[in-house]
Amino acid sequence: MTLHRLLARAGALALLLMVFAMNVFAQGKTVTGKVTDSKDGTPVANASVTIKGTNRGTTTDAGGNFRIAVDNNNAVLVISSVGFTEYELTVGAQTDFSISLAAAQGTLNEVVVVGYGTQRKRDLTGAVATVSSKDFVKGAIQTPEQLISGKVAGVQITSNNGAAGAGSRIRIRGGASLNASNDPLVVIDGLPVDNGNALSLINPNDIESFTLLKDPSAAAIYGSRASNGVIIITTKKGRKGKVKFNFGAQGFLQTAVKNVDVLTASEFESVIKSRPELSSVANLLGKSSTDWQNEIYRPAFGQDYNLSASGTVIDGKLPFRISGGFLNQDGILKTDNFKRYSGGLNLSPKFFKDNLKVDLNLKIARTVNADADFGAIGSAVSFDPTQATTTNSNRFDGYYEWLQGGRPAANANRNPLGLLYSRDHSRELTRFIGNIQLDYSIPFVKGLRANLNLGNEYSNERGSFVKSDSAASAYPAIGGKGGYRNRSYLERRNKLFDFYLNYVKDVKSINSRIDLTAGTGYQDYRYFNFNYQSWYYDGSPNGPYPIRLSDNSDDANGDNGYTIISYYSRLTYNLASKYILTLNGRADGSSRFAKENRWGFFPSAAVAWRVSEENFLKNSKVISDLKFRVGYGVTGQQDIPGLYPYLAVYNQSNNNGLYQLGNTYYNRLGPVEYDPNIKWETTENINAAVEYGLFNDRVTGILEVFSRKTKDLVSVVPIALGANFANSLLTNVGNIESKGFEVTMNFIPVKNQNTQWDIGFNVTYANPKITKLLINEDPNFAGNNVTVIGGSIGTTAQIDAVGYRPRSFYMYQQVYDQNNKPIEGLYEDQNRDGIINEKDLRVFKPSDAPVYLGINSSVTYKRFNAGFVMRGSIGNYVYNNVFMQYGVINQAKLGAVPQNIHNSYLQTGFLNKQELSDYYIQNGSFLRLDNINFGYDAGAIAKNVNLRITANVQNVFLITKYKGLDPELTNGMDNNIYPRPRTFVLGVNLDF
Amino acid sequence: MKYFITRISAIFMAAMVLTACHKKLDQFPANTLTSEDAYKNLDGYKRVLARVYGSMVLTSQNAPATGCFGCGDVKGVDEGFSDFFRNYWTVQDMSTDMAKWKYADDGLYDMQFNRWNAGNPLVEGLYGRCMLVITFANEFLRESTPEKLSARGINAETIKPMRAEVRFIRAYMYWVLMDIYGNPGFVTETDPFGTFTPPQITRAELFTYIENELKGIDADLLAPRTNEYGRADKAAAWAILARMYLNAQVYINQPKFTEAITYSKKVIDAGYSLMSNYQWLFMADNHIGNTEAIWTLNYDGVKSQSYGGATFIINGTGSGERQPLVQLNGLGGWGAMRATEKIPQLFPDVTGTADKRSLWYTDQQSLNMDDYFEYQFGLPTTKFRNRTRSGGYGNDPNRTFSDIDIAVSRLAEMYLTYAEAVKRGGAGGSEAQAVIYLNLLRQRAYGNASGNITTYDLDFILDERARELYWEGFRRIDLIRYNRYSEGTYLWPWKGGLRNGTAFDATKKLLPIPSKQLAVNPNLKQNLGY
């Protein structure tokens, strides 16, 4: 089904639901009212007001006001809102009401979505954080994780770069692994999704809340996938009451913030002409003055539209929500574009006297990414600024290029604009995700319910890559062919079957409450990676056809995947609402491992003491809430590289790897290295916390301390040659330990009828340290070198070394002269043996931040509101690959052509690249004003139409000592990263 | 009640389904084979044999990658550098007066300035390559025992020469390890598989092992020049024995020149003849009518691609700044490699007017390598050309990969071995015969008898070896045998890192055991001086 047809059908369905809603509407008298918080008289927005016994209802606006038509004076209004006790009143003769809602025992019964069900917030014993839609980061949010960026202690969200639709790296408490995935498990409406593309296709506007399970006592219920924490996303559901529509539109403008500081045309010319070693390229300089970076970047526009309808239809029986979204965003790099079409449907009817609750969620999305050539960014930094962008010729699509023998020069960079425009690429992702959850409260066993969740996820990624043979970057070799027409196709499938029983019993006699869950799950992930023939632009094949074992498919890698079968249970025991014990246990079997290692058991235990419930605090005026909790848990990580790492297999060479014996070229068959005993990584964690609320919860906070130890780290380590079919092997060898703390504080300095001011602050310290790396410890083993330096041939910048943070920099110590200028090629001889060699490298600074923090604040004054989010990190360092690669004289000549250099050479005077000088390790600590937002609630602009206007600026400023563009990087390597733009957003939102 | 029963039975059903599901955890990748699949027929054995041979030519099972450190057979080093011949050649020729490299890649400066240590990626790469080929060979031997063959219904007679060839390859790899590392780890097919740590073997013990192996397989190897192209025969084993005996003084401190004569003579008498045109030995179609090669490593620009072999030599020497050279040699240019002046100076004239083996590109180049970094200093060779005899280009339309097969041993080396062993006092040969052999080489080089000799001395042999075998990976061995490698008696540009050359530590005649292997294998002890 094409997307258009699908959207059309969704639209038709929406229309149908609307008609239902209209039909049941009847006329009577109209009453109005204002709903306030009994505690302080502040208005309660979005409270639901329904007429008992009907499906009719409305919600309050931002000022707490509502307006509803009733049939007669006997009508009963039911006013409810999350966190408040439900309130009922009979209308009578009155037409205007002032309703004061009491807090539901201080939000005590508020429930939180945890794994396999919900828990009352007061019963939580683990590190669980929730962010609901009202607290989301506002603005032009393209991917869901950005909704909570900077909002939650212990969670670090780093966008990959500034490209349109770029995803993020999410780390909860710093990650527990070296080579296995460090991504948290993402669960959407009960369906653990494939982490290959977990979030990019979810429309942020469809999300109701995030729950983050940060420590194993909370996450252990997800067993072998929970070592990096769990993110549970709950999408918006159908609401009670009359059908309401919401339409949101945002327009935004992105601009480049800063360019890389390279030489201008005249500076460049004078450098080239002043240095004899560059004389051979002096005559190649042009007459123009081109700022290539200005040429490739542009102000970029974007639009985001969302329409949703939600309410109850069919005599109040069928709550539904249907939504559609369209995002179209240009990137600041020319030709970069990202589009997302999305649609969602939720139906949540109840049957059999509400004993059977059905929750059906369907989401479909499609993204189209223009796949711009980010290589243009590096090329724009270094392309000769004295050349014009275009020529008078039609050759190379008119772009100026370096020639050699009349052809694009070897060893020369290509025109950045040519890279961008002489190219026609696109990547389209389509994803369907759906689940149906049946929750049945068994009528004659009070407190017992059965829950069945069936889920399915399907996605495919289709790439189309065309470059003409007149593009300089794909120009034919002499006598050869050029350009290409290639494609790619990848399919992912994920099936879930989950069933659990839950039993809740209040045993009044012993003042206890028992909540017991036990269940089982089956989940299967499949990958189909199609391996297509490569073609030249003229349509002739480039190279031999891919090998297939079966002739009937184009699918070279076949149907690969893995399956997990699980049994889990959780017991929560609550004594006198003061003492709470939670026990979790999960057994997981994963097809990734050999029979003997396949099953793992992941237990956890945690206790909490709600001190504020004790008599000596109950009436305290100062302490409104106080809770201590401590937990211990074991989790696993089965998401290690490779799907079948324990199996002995033979692989077949590809068609470029044949070997000639006699007159025949043989597809070679060879054994592959393997570890038959490989198993999951396990993480043990102890977590202790105090949660407090002071002055009637005007000051709240959490202090958490944790200690985490991962053992059996899966790591590719060198092994003794001769024993296996490689010199390194993926095996369980290492240990990592991490200690840290998180501080979360929230203040409400002002809260009154008209004004509320919130301030939130969170800071996290995590200090992971590798404690073991090799099978046999060896003091002479420095560690595993990782992260290749851009522009080098295989030189690495970082190391995983025992005693240090993963991915610390590993460099020579630069020696400086009296004027603090680095002396080229002179390094500290650490071991004093008279030679500078790799033994003199030292582990220098971490690439990941030990400390990161978030500050946010919002103010609401009458109909205005404003807020900001700041994020920062302290103690992270960045390898300034741009300075290193371009800030040297000899780079002014590349091959036989001139190339622009970075003006940092003025500070160093370096002639040659100094790849391993710690001079280039620069302090990457930063504080960024991520977002400021303003909103104005215009109220009713027509009957039943409410308008809200918003404005945002994103990436407002950055405070840092870092000398490059932006120190916020996923791996600490600054190498021509697509810069994060500054974004200006205007939005309108209509409720009707 | 009805619902309750329905629910309960659903739970039971689910439980039963799940028990059955546990079997679903037994999974096997699509499009992959077990060893039983791989060896189910003769073709399978042949393809595994191709894996063993091909591991000396191809750097992984997939299209060759360069700049990738985890893609190749040898992990942790750049796959592009990890071809056996490239790695071997770099040690044998780039650490001498033969060639210097422009870029500071991958430990190359330390290699060419004779200051490497145990962490050098080239040191690690060659050791890893040799040991892995040995491991693949051992696997083939384990899977071709009489018991396994009969269980699989495979004809043991057909497999017999393959087994002998695999043992030959293993012995050749051990010879490389003995020559370069001296005392490597040692593992055969009888050792356990998994995470076993192989013991170390001494250079002398290894010498004996190789000698016994190469002699022990003689009966099973096919007669000279009767096997398929690219596969080893008896003469291939004899040629390695002859080479090993010529250098026995270095390896085990005992002269074995008589044996060197015996085995070089066996090869010489086995029916080989010199190719009429020296240049043809190093061209894209050098597999055609090659009467001189004894055993070759087979490359193809499309079907057997690797960044090693002549792909490396030609691209390394070529440069985009010298288009005529790129045209002449038939592949692109990385603008990196030239010879020091010492080698062109061995010829009567650089341009090859007299001795046609003198194949150098001189336009815009200066003979003296005053600067290793600037391409114009030193001469690129045109000995290797990915062109055909008829003037065509190689198979790769993109002109990146070479088709040139690399001869591990060829007849000319045997002539030179014979002559040197006679001169060094070996029995069973004569100087008169040696002069005849040497003049065969000279006549081919000069095109007539004008370069003929009547007598010769050892220095002549060293120089003649350089003239005949330059850039084929022999120089380090030769200089060590002549005590001119680390010593101050012979200096070349950039020897020891200085323009005019300087002596370096004699312990550098052996490469160190790679530090990563020392770290993971407690049985290994480092060579002296590292």
Image (cartoon, coloured by chain):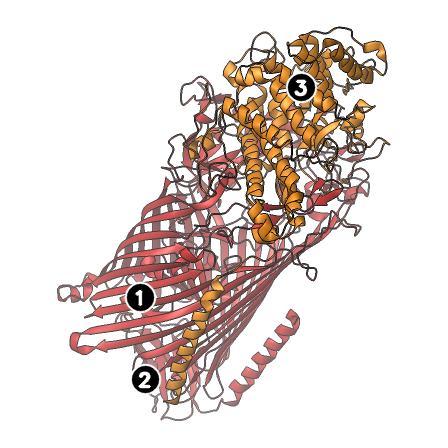
Chain colours: A red, B orange
Residue A340 appears in the rendering: no
Q: Position of residue A626 (x, y in %)?
A: 22, 61
Residue placed under numbered mark 2 in the picture: A88
- Foreground disc of the pair 3, 2: 3
**Mark 3 belongs to chain:** B
Residue B289 lies in quadrant = top right
Residue B6 lies in quadrant = bottom left
| Tag 3–tag 2 contact (CB < 8 Å) | no
Name which residue lies at 60% across and 37% down.
B79
Distance between mark 3 and mark 2 Cα atoms: 111 Å
Residue A249 appears in the rendering: yes
Residue placed under numbered mark 3 in the picture: B262
**Mark 1 belongs to chain:** A
Name which residue lies at 63% across and 15% down.
B258
Residue placed under numbered mark 1 in the picture: A752
Q: Please indicate whether residue B39 sits to the left or right of residue A967 in the image.
A: right
Hey, what amino acid is under mark 1? Asn
Q: Secondary structure at mark 2?
A: strand
A988, B62: nearer the viewer: B62
Disc 1 packing (10 Å; few <14; some 14–19; many ≥20): few
- Foreground disc of the pair 3, 1: 3
Distance between mark 1 and mark 2 Cα atoms: 25 Å
**Mark 2 belongs to chain:** A
